[in-house]
Image: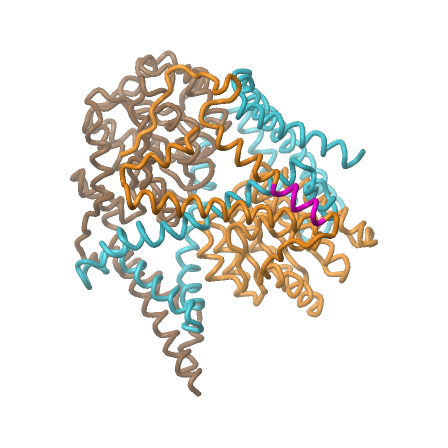
Chain colours: A cyan, B brown, C orange
Amino acid sequence: MRKEGPMIVTVLSSLVVLFSNYFFLGQQWGLTDRLDYWFNISYGIALALGFVNLTIIHWKYVQRRREGWVYSVILLLVMYGYLLLGIVEQHTGPTFSWIYDNMMTVLGAAVFSLLAFLISSAAYRAFRIRTKEATILLVCAIFILLARAPIGDAIWSRWSYWGNEWFMGVLNTAGYRGILLGAYVGAFAVALRILLGLERAHLGGTGTQ
Amino acid sequence: MERLMKIDRRIIYLLGAAIVFLTMLYPLGLPVAISDLARQTYNEVENLPDDAVVILSPMYDSGAMGELNPMFVALFRHCAERGYKIIIVNTQWVQGPQIVHKFATEIAEEYGYVYGEDWINLGSKPGAAIFLQTAVKDFWEACIEDFNGQPVESYPIMQLVPKVTAEYVDACLVLNCGTPGAPEWLAYVCQPEGIKLVIGEIQMSVPESMPYVQSGQYAGMIAGSRGCAEYEQLIGHPGQALKAQDTMSAIALMVTLFIILGNIGYLATRKK
Amino acid sequence: MMWFLAQEEAKPVLGLFVEGTIVDIIVVLLLGILIWVMVSRARTGRPIPEIKKIAGLEAIDEAIGRATEMGRPVTFIPGILSVSNAQTLAAFGVASHVARQCARYDTRLLVLTCDPLPYAVLEEITRQSYLEEGRPDAFNPDDVRFLSAEQFAFASAVIGVYERERPAANIMIGAFYAESMIFAETASFQGMISIGGTAHTHQLPFFVAACDYALIGEEIYAASAYLSKEPVLYGTVVGQDILKILVWIIILIGGIVATVNPETTFGKLFEF
């Protein structure tokens, strides 16, 4: 019953979604909305459990003075401190917002901006004319790279047109549509495999029946 | 020659950082050609009725603000110039409305826009699909309160929009960088309700959104930083995106040169 | 420009179905039948078509083998979205295989998650896999980690794990966004063998450029069936491929018809 119970819940939920989306009566009853509410509630509970779990794990680290236990103390202090501040001030409070704007926002932007550097080194490392396919990839990459910046037009006035409008709009879109179609059919098949109980990886273990 | 294949990545990073600073200090001023897509997007916003109500949704966080903040500024300014009523709201991306609030306040002051009458920031709402579906049925119930914690129905602008349907809303302008994003607005609001959807997209995701533009599901798209630079020129207010184009050019050139160097090294060593 | 107009009053089609879903239902039934036929053939030992070799999936065992030889851990990241995303569900199948292999070769496996729900599921999958391989004692719950629900905080935490734990292999299957490049490139600096797979087309170029092996789009959905070597699951992939061929034929016919007669109403056939 350890696996059968969740399996039954999975199949029933899938049938409710199917009924709600395809059958007029199901749509009128708004069953999918209800399921979405349930999902959000379960998500909230999972987050609360994670909160408790994190506290227990890091409290143990502190008690046992495990390597790096100081970071656990910092984590617990920040987690509970910010939670309390949020409860007292709410999310529009000046201190709460100040911390969020000047730490979370800035740190997030800093990590994202690493991408600019990483893309440069990855491009340098990856685009080598090793094979015919790699050569095509390299030529396309350089063509689009220069087309997306005004330097392309400075070299040749039609660069941006061919790069941004024809290349992106025709060749690229055709390729993307192909990949997307395949991916959607694949996602659809996974959903059906789960609905039919053929795939059970999400319940733990080997993932086959 | 082998050295060309193994240039230390720190040299690439240092050079990249130097180029960013230098081009910001000494801009080259290369012209940015305006594409048909930018013109189409501009026209879609420009040709809304004079008393239009638009939803401007900053569906992003700090990671994408470098690219999407200038788009927000350009779209907000364009709408304010045309005299549209602007409602800022998003779902799930908690930082979005917080990040854009100061820009919106500054531009609103410039155009004499009154908060609660001509524009409003409803903040970020949880729920993604549930929020969007509820907004279609009852916008007030979906939002409850604005960014400042006041009940939404207390504002005159909200009296104009009891539901997010084509009857009350003329266009949704969604700044997109992930999930949930423009596809969710399309699926739950714009397509079923027949509301025009114009998006601002980060460069990385432009190829993915292109099929939606071609099918007409997105009426227009500001395509990355370059697209935003084009849009800024069209509205006659050059901004951050246009300034960034010289840096983009220099970096693109640098990366191209490194790729070429790497390949020269590769070919030379392969022949040996 | 095609626009999607709001429906005035919803009415059931054939007294039962939601308007616009008939074709969807036919496709669901068709795929169901195809899968059923193929699975039945597989169960009774009758031949079913072969699936092509997927280099990225073949490389998983090789990567784990390399980590075993070097005595260093393997990392697995199931993307950053929750269990409601099909890519995350597909990642669970791969996680199960990776956990079994690691248990078999006594290699340490670090599972790094960005969402509380996949964290809980993956802990169970890993525990169960170790149990099934007869190594419950080797399972360490601390090695399945929920690092942060914030995208870039998660990215920094993963880089930290790479730096401290020095894994030899890095397997990333699931829904990734901007962090994909950060993971793949940092893994490359560390000399790790990287296998990346996603159906997010905007991240595919990064995986193709920066990883040793990349799984493109639908390949990640076939992964669990492919890795399990179970004929029954193979059958489902074959069924899915036949459906794809049917879709391909419809697109081809539609393309020809629309080219010959641009005013065609062929597309209307699929709007029911």
Image quarter of residue B111? top left
Report whether residue A23 is seen: yes
**Relative depth, front residue between C29 and C61:** C29
Q: Residue at position x 49%, y 22% from top?
A: C18
For the N terminus of chain A, which image quadrant? top right
Residue C172 position in % (x across, y down): 58, 54
Residue B259 position in % (x across, y down): 37, 69
| Magenta residue span | C34-42
Residue C272 position in % (x across, y down): 44, 28
Residue B57 placement, left or right of C182: left
**Relative depth, front residue between B12 and A129:** A129
Q: Is residue C39 magenta?
A: yes
Report whether residue C152 is seen: no
**Relative depth, front residue between C210 and B67:** C210
Q: Residue at position x 29%, y 42% from top?
A: B222
For the C terminus of chain A, which image quadrant? top right
Residue C221 position in % (x across, y down): 58, 48
Q: Residue at position x 23%, y 32% from top?
A: B45
Residue B71 placement, left or right of C202: left
**Secondary structure of the magenta portion, mostly?**
helix
Q: Residue at position x 28%, y 41% from top?
A: C261
